[in-house]
Amino acid sequence: MKTLIIRTDSLGDFYVTIPYINCLTRIYGKKNVDVVVKKHIYSHIKKKNFLYNKLYSFPERGIFERIYLLLKLRKQKYKQLIIFDGKDRSIILSKFLNINKIYHTYPQKKSTYLTNLLFSKKYISFLDNRIIPIEDLYKKIFNEIGIKIIKKDYKILLFKNIKRINIFKNENIGTKRFTHIHVDEKWFSNFYIRKFTNISPNIKDFYLFLRKIIITKKTNLIITTGTIELPFIKNISNRYFNVKDKGYFCLKVGKFKAILFNKISIEDLEIITMNANNLIACQGAITQIAASFNVNLMDILERSQEKWYFRHTSHIKKYNKLYRKNFKKLSKEIILKIK
């Protein structure tokens, strides 16, 4: 059945949706599944054409750009539409598509007036109370359609060996032989959400933390960062790491090493995560990659937001939940969970 999927959210939200795209392509064939994504992740998802037949970019703004998208979609003559993002813009777009069956979610706090006023019984709605796990919500849609997701659908990306990243051709670090630590702005409340508990390690404590992991767990480390420039990363790399010719930093501890990247492409971040034995990160998009590749995950989250995070992690098997706290205390908990 020719199917259109709309998911105009962040990259992490798209990762969560991939198992359901995989299920649809497995049942209907890839040639029958097209996807609409938000413009800012379009270029990245465009490289993953193993997931879909056609990919469309939803314009951030501009009525003419949206009309142009609408005209392109109308030509495809879809039989069903699944709106995974529950957004008004997606529901309004669907009103002008000639599609027989439309499935969509809607948030509890949002009035269903728009749907009831404008749309016919071809719209099948599912309440998202923002507590129910995403997996359970989406399975309700699939139960209505009459299809079932299976284990292999949860493999969200194609595996790529770490040696696809040039520097690892010479660094002698292979699959499942390292622990991945992703240090982004979420570790520092003043760069993220100020009301969240601040982790904010100082550079000496973090350096000692790295050494202890290497010595006690006998593992290499790969440290990656987010898109925001953090003074912490600059300071620790300058003080404790040696600069390599190819633009990364290296710290040797005996026969093991810690490699630090100050910024990295999304593609390389995916490859590092899927090849890791352990991942230490504040809850985000890469936790879904860790889940897909059976990586032992230490997920650092704000206690008050636990129910929200659980919506996106209920399906993960190797999952260690850690609450944000003073880094010295948190680091001890992390080390106990590393395998």
Image (cartoon, rainbow, N blue to C red):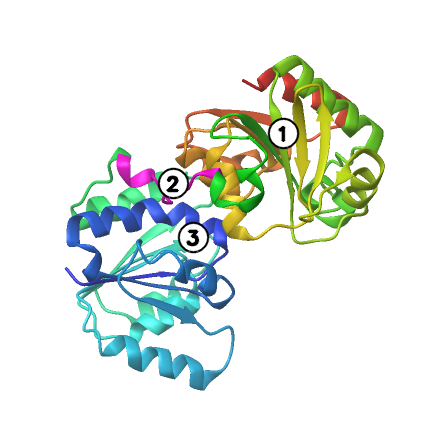
How far apart are labels 2 and 3 at the CA level? Answer: 18 Å
Q: Quadrant of the N terminus?
A: bottom left
Find residue 88 and report its image quarter. Answer: bottom left
The kind of residue on which mark 3 rests is: Phe
Which is more N-terminal, label 1 or label 3? 3
Q: Nearer the viewer, mark 3 or mark 1?
A: 1
Residue visible at 71% across and 23% down in the picture = 331
Horizontal side of 139 relative to 228 (left or right) equals: left
Chief secondary structure of the magenta portion: loop
At label 2, counting other C-alpha atoms closer than 10 Å, the crowd grade (few under 14, some 14-19, many 20 or more) is few
Q: Is residue 254 visible?
A: yes
Query: Which residues, given as a range, are shown in magenta?
Result: 152-162
Q: Is residue 299 visible?
A: no
Residue that badge 1 annotates: 221
Question: Residue 329 placed where, x, y %?
Answer: 74, 21
Mark 1 residue element: strand
Question: Residue 58 placed where, x, y %?
Answer: 43, 71
Which numbered circle lies on residue 159? 2
Mark 3 residue element: helix
Q: Is residue 308 magenta?
A: no
How far apart are labels 3 and 1 at the CA level? Answer: 28 Å
Horizontal side of 291 relative to 198 (left or right) equals: left
Do callouts 3 and 1 mark residues in contact (Cβ within 8 Å)? no
Which numbered circle lies on residue 14? 3
Question: Residue 239 placed where, x, y %?
Answer: 85, 36
Which numbered circle lies on residue 114? none
Q: Residue furthest bottom?
A: 64
The kind of residue on which mark 2 rests is: Phe
Which is more N-terminal, label 2 or label 1? 2
